[in-house]
Structures are given as C-alpha cells and as structure tokens.
Image (spheres, rainbow, N blue to C red):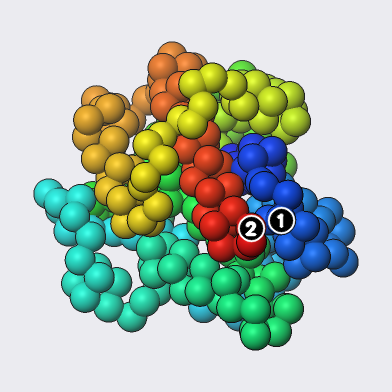
Amino acid sequence: WSALGHRLVGELAQRHLNPAARAEVDKLLAGEPDPTLAGVADWADKLRDTDPARFKQTQSWHYINTPPGTCEYKPERDCPDGNCVIAAIEKQRAILADRSQPLEARRDALKFIVHFVGDVHQPMHASNRTDKGGNGYQISLRTDLQPEAYARKNYVDGVMGTNLHSVWDYYILGSKKLELSPYAAKLDAPPWPPAAPTTSDPAAWAGESCRLIESRHLYPEGHKLDIAYLDAQRPLAEQRVRQAAYRLANLLNETLGH
Ligand code: ADE
Ligand code: ZN
Ligand code: ZN
C-alpha cells in the first residue's frame, strides 16, 4: 500500500488495542515524531530516502511471490533466505515479543510489523504472476485525481501512466478523497471482526491475497482503466485494510497485552 493504506491500517488497529498493549506501544514509540501506529506505519517505505542501505536490505520483506498456478506457500521454495513478507512478520514478531531485546530493536520490529501486516493484505503483494506483483503490468488510468508532483510527467490530458501494482497501492483508496481519520472511522464499522478470529498465520493472509487476484478478476481485459474499476474494487481494498487492522491489533494484543 501507499502511505494512506498503511496509515489506515495503523489508525484502525490502534482503536482495537487492549490497554496493556496500548501502554507498551506508547512506551516503544515514545520519542517518535508521531508516536502512534498510523504515525509509524509508513516508516519502512520512507527508509528508501532516510536510510537507503537499510531499505535495500529490507526491500524484499514487503512481498511474497509463489510459482505460477499456486498460492500455496512453501518456505524452503518461496522464501529460502527468509527475506519475504511472511518470514519478516514472524521474525519481527519474535523480536517484539522478547523483552530482553534492546528497546530500539523492539521499536523497529513494531514499526516493521505495522507495515508488513498491511502489505501482506494488499493482493498484489502476494502474487503468483510473473510481473512483480503487477509492477510490470502497464496501465493507462483515466482519473480526475491531481497527480503527485513526481507523477506529473506521466500525466497527460487526464490519463495517468501507471501500473496495476500502483493502482492497488494507491489509486483505489486515494480516489475516495477522504482524510485519514474520517476514513479510518468509516472503516471501523460493522461487521466487526471483518475476518475469522482464528487466522493468525501470515502465510494464510498471503494465501488469501494471492487467491483474490484470480477470484475477483483484479487483472483487467486490456490496459486501460478508469474510475469504474476503482469504484468496483474499492470495497475489496477496504475489506483487506479492515482485515489487516483487525489482525494487527490481535497480534499486538497477544504479543504485548499482558
Ligand atoms: N517485486 C517483486 N514482486 C513483487 C510483489 N509481489 N510486490 C511488490 N514488489 C515486488
Ligand atoms: Zn506495493
Ligand atoms: Zn511496503
């Protein structure tokens, strides 16, 4: 997801922390410019600018690819070096849970987890296609959204040159044109919980994402999209954000809430 999606997951999860987990989160994030889950949700992407070496080391922790035709995760085949989103969530969770670890390590683990639980719910981040999670699937998107400064060079006569991964990371949620807090409040609605409470395995979350790509026809017929696609897919994107938030809150309540 882009900053908006990650911040929605963080803000929504924060609303469902138990008091003990909330106190531990406050302790770990004391000293952060914005000491909330939403405030740190985008940190793992911002490393690209603030700490390029660390970003490079952690780049593949944001996604998982399985071979064409299967959504089943086999660690030794699909993540042999441990550098994928599923292993990253498990590893950072162990650091977060270990109170003998230095505070800084547990703080970074929390910031990674907030981000990666979001990413693994973004369908394109757990793919079995061979196009880097839709990054290689070019899209001409007709939109009335004002492009960000960096994207303006790809914007001609109301049509944005982008790709399917970015459509899912940003444009579906961004085209709702809501600010963070009103959007999070709107997503904090029945039915809650938005997922079976029993699923706490990141590999299962990735499997769901991967299967949605085919079952919900996320790949369009051609390469031209407009607001109709964004509107049609927004309920699914919002549901994945809700599930990510619910599962993130559960993970933190179980790991920190005692
Ligand atoms: N790079 C390669 N595969 C990717 C994916 N599924 N998501 C994001 N970046 C990727
Ligand atoms: Zn992405
Ligand atoms: Zn990411």
How packed mark 2 is, by other alpha carbons closer than 10 Å (few <14, some 14-19, many 20 or more), is some
Q: Quadrant of residue 85?
A: bottom left
Of all residues, the one furthest to the front in this rendering is 258
In the rendered structure, find residue 45 and report the number of the disc placed on it: none
* 234, above or below 127, in the image: above
- Say which residue appears at 37% left-offset and 25% top-offset: 224
In the image as oriented, which residue stretches furthest toward the left?
69
Report which residue position mark 2 lands on.
257
**Looking at numbered disc 2 in the image, what kind of residue is underneath it?**
Gly
Residue closest to the eye, 125 or 133: 125
Where's residue 156, x and y in %? 57, 29
Q: Relative to residue 174, is residue 122 drawn left or right?
A: left
Q: Could you say whether the residue bearing mark 1 is in a helix, strand or loop?
A: helix
Residue 182: x percent and y percent? 73, 24
Residue 188, x across and y down, in percent:
62, 27
The structure residue drawn at horizontal position 26% and vertical position 28%, both measured from the top left corner, is: 217
* Residue 81 placement, left or right of 104: left
Residue at image position (20%, 50%) is 71
In the picture shown, does residue 79 fall above or below 247? below
The answer to whether one can see residue 133 in this image is: no
Whether residues under marks 2 and 1 lie with C-beta atoms below 8 angstroms apart, the answer is yes
49 or 60: nearer the viewer: 60
Residue at the spot of label 1 = 20
